[in-house]
Image (cartoon, rainbow, N blue to C red):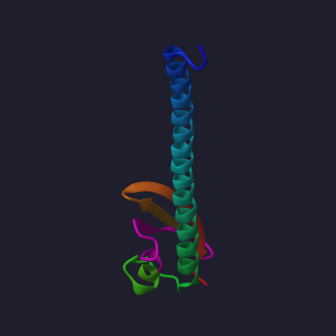
Amino acid sequence: EKGFTLLEVIVAMLILALIVVGVFSTISNVTRSTSSVNVAQSSGNLAASLMEIVKRQPYAPSYDKEEAVYQNLITQFPGYDADIKADPIASRDSLIQKITVTITYNGKTITTLEDYKTER
């Protein structure tokens, strides 16, 4: 009469299985969450870097992302793409552009950054 009954062993195994499934589920969720944070952070860094490059360039009607100065940066972020748009805003003192940098990751828009540039 020493030892465990079959029912006790089955219940113990069921409890252990539930604990293991819970742990693996938590690990999976944390990994997925970390991945999305990394994508958002990389996207933000890329957008800010491209905006700084645009702002250092001479004033122009448009900024082509295919130029080497932009492509050298974009290619460092596999899976990411960028769109750089310059919309003129007329003012009486000077020309002002609204610069919009949009970053996509695997075809999905992640970050849009807007700033202004003036002709000096």
Q: Is residue 94 above or below residue 89?
A: below
Among the 4 quarters of the image, the one containing residue 119: bottom right
Residue at x 41% of width, y 80% of height: 71
Q: Quadrant of residue 44?
A: bottom right
Q: x, y percentage for residue 98? A: 54, 66
Residue 90 visible to an observer of this rendering: no
Tell which of 30 and 79 is nearer to you.
30
Q: Position of residue 31 (x, y in %)?
A: 53, 50
94 is higher (above) or lower (below) than 11? below
Q: Is residue 89 magenta?
A: yes
Q: Nearer the viewer, residue 10 or 15?
A: 10
Q: Quadrant of the C terminus?
A: bottom right
Farthest residue in the front direction? 1
Q: In this orientation, which residue lies closer to the viewer: 109 or 2?
A: 2
What's the magenta region?
73-98
Q: State the residue at coordinates (57%, 39%).
A: 23
Q: Total number of numbered labels?
A: 0
Look at the image and tell me in which quarter the N terminus lies: top right
Q: Nearer the viewer, residue 54 or 89?
A: 54
Could you say where residue 74 lies in the image, as x and y percent from the top left? 44, 75
Q: Is residue 10 visible?
A: yes
The spot of residue 109 in percent (x, y) is 44, 55
